[in-house]
Amino acid sequence: MTVSFRDKLLAELRAEAATVPWEPRPARRPARHLVAAAGLAAAVAAAVAVVIPLMSQTPAFAVVKNPDGTVTVRINEFVRPKELEKRLREEGVRAVIDYVPYGQTCREPRGEIVPQPERMPLRRAEDSMDFWIDPKDFGPDETLVVQMHSANDDPAKSNGGSVGVVRGPVAPCELVPVAFSGVERE
């Protein structure tokens, strides 16, 4: 079961609220307590005004560790690849993620490529945009390399890409034009 960003945020807010000590209200409150209460109410209203819109927005990506040790990934927008790399690293997957403009690609080779039949670096979930990775599929010196092309510079749409595993260091992405049917387009 995948936990949504909204559900995670709500669970964190509930856990935080549970740690707040509550004391019984005195029978009669001095005026200064009313001012403090009004200030607290304003702060809570401001926090709710910020949290509600954040909860309704879809995050650019989600990374969830599954009970079996695999990692489920969903990419909603092709933005902030370094943040996605960091989240994957936190879950035990070393990765290099590059989002490149349409008509561009990274110059190859970027390192020693591990042959595809040897292992499948990620698997797509049926009827979903999710894919999952098993960190145990990677050797200690292996890196998942993902390159995605945006469709018409729209960060919410992909126009394809490539996935592979590189053993040893991974060269940075040096953008070069893509050759289409033997002819380069600009």
Image: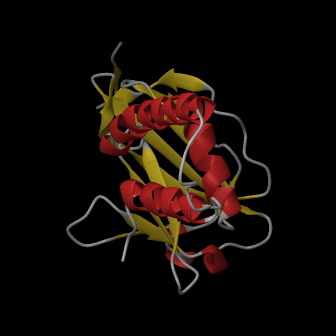
Count of number-bearing discs: 0
Instruction: Work out whether residue 2 or residue 72 is closer to the camera in this orientation and state it.
Output: 2
Give the residue furthest to the left: 127
Q: Is residue 166 visible?
A: no
Task: Answer with the quarter of the image where residue 77 lies.
Answer: top left
Give the residue drawn at x 39%, y 61%.
7
Give the residue drawn at x 57%, y 62%.
24
Q: Is residue 41 visible?
A: yes
Q: Position of residue 177 (x, y in %)?
A: 46, 21
Q: Position of residue 61 (x, y in %)?
A: 44, 48
Note whether 186 is above or below 38 in the view shown: above
Give the residue furthest to the top: 186
Give the residue furthest to the bottom: 68
Quadrant of image for the N terminus: bottom left
Instruction: Work out whether residue 85 or residue 100 is closer to the camera in this orientation and state it.
Output: 85
Q: How is the image coloured?
A: secondary structure
Note whether 30 is above or below 11 in the view shown: above
Give the residue drawn at x 55%, y 59%.
17
Instruction: Work out whether residue 6 or residue 16 is closer to the camera in this orientation and state it.
Output: 16
Q: Position of residue 26 (x, y in %)?
A: 58, 54
